[in-house]
Image (spheres, rainbow, N blue to C red):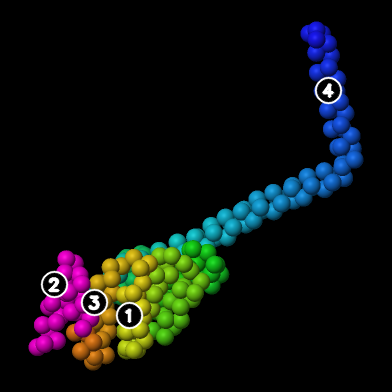
Amino acid sequence: MKHSERKHLKTNEFANAIGHANHWRAAHQQKITLTLVALVVVVAGVLGYIAWRNSVDNKARALLAEAMVVYEAPVQPAPAPSLEAAGNESPAAPASPGTYPTERAKLEAALPKLMTAADEYPSTNPGQTARYHAAASLVGLGRFDEAITEYDRVIDEGSGLMAQMARLGKAEAQLRASQYDAAIASFSELSNRSDVGVPKEAMLMELARAYRLAGKNDDARKTLTQVVEQHADSPFASEAKAELEKIKG
């Protein structure tokens, strides 16, 4: 076949293909249009959702940052009044800006800000972080039952490291509230978890402490012995030996 004939056939094939394509497009024009419209709507929705999530996250971070400024503020006791030459006391100098006279005063100021961030944006990472610090503040204020409730919310609504930290905080709050059986159960569970991010022997030491505070010295002794025998290379082994000596004494 001559070159000119082959070229002519290819041209005809291309023209036929274009013709078929145009015919198919004309027959399915409505479906094509609807598909394109649906695609545009989906893309717009995804972009809108991303923008909304970013906006929510930014607002949550702003509230958390505002609360953390107070939560992490330094404690600076107010200076005592000075004595003037005449023997009269002069007014105490004002505290430095951004400081608090006591830890309690600082926590009382930080708590409502932390709870605002937590309650307004509970499903965000900043909101969950705010709730965790609010629970820690409640522990510092001696409001243990409220702290445990907030730790439970972090555990239920959060995940990963924040949830594990909340489990540790809850166990400590239970211990400080003299809820010894609950604390023992919490520390026992934590000592058997592999996702806590804390060495098992460290959790066993906390469990032994809970047993001792509950007056269960036999259980404390067994737990400390477990640390010594199963974690001999750990820095906690020597501490466990010292605690065993105290129990024997």
Q: Dot 1: what SS?
A: helix
Q: Dot 2: what SS?
A: helix
Question: Which residue type does callout 4 highlight?
Answer: Glu
Q: Which mark is residue 238?
A: 2
* Image x and y of residue 33, in percent: 83, 44
Which class describes the residues within 10 Å of circle 2: few (<14), some (14-19), or many (20+)? some
Name the residue at 26% across, 76% down.
204
Q: Name the residue tied to disc 3.
A: 205
Measure the alpha-carbon separation of dots 2 and 1.
Answer: 21 Å
> Magenta segment, which residues?
222-249
Q: Name the residue tied to disc 4.
A: 13
Measure the alpha-carbon separation of dots 4 and 3.
Answer: 82 Å
Measure the alpha-carbon separation of dots 2 and 3.
Answer: 11 Å
Q: Earlier in the sequence, mark 2 or mark 4?
A: 4
Instruction: Tell me if residue 109 comes above or below residue 61 in the rendering.
Output: below
Q: Nearer the viewer, mark 1 or mark 4?
A: 4
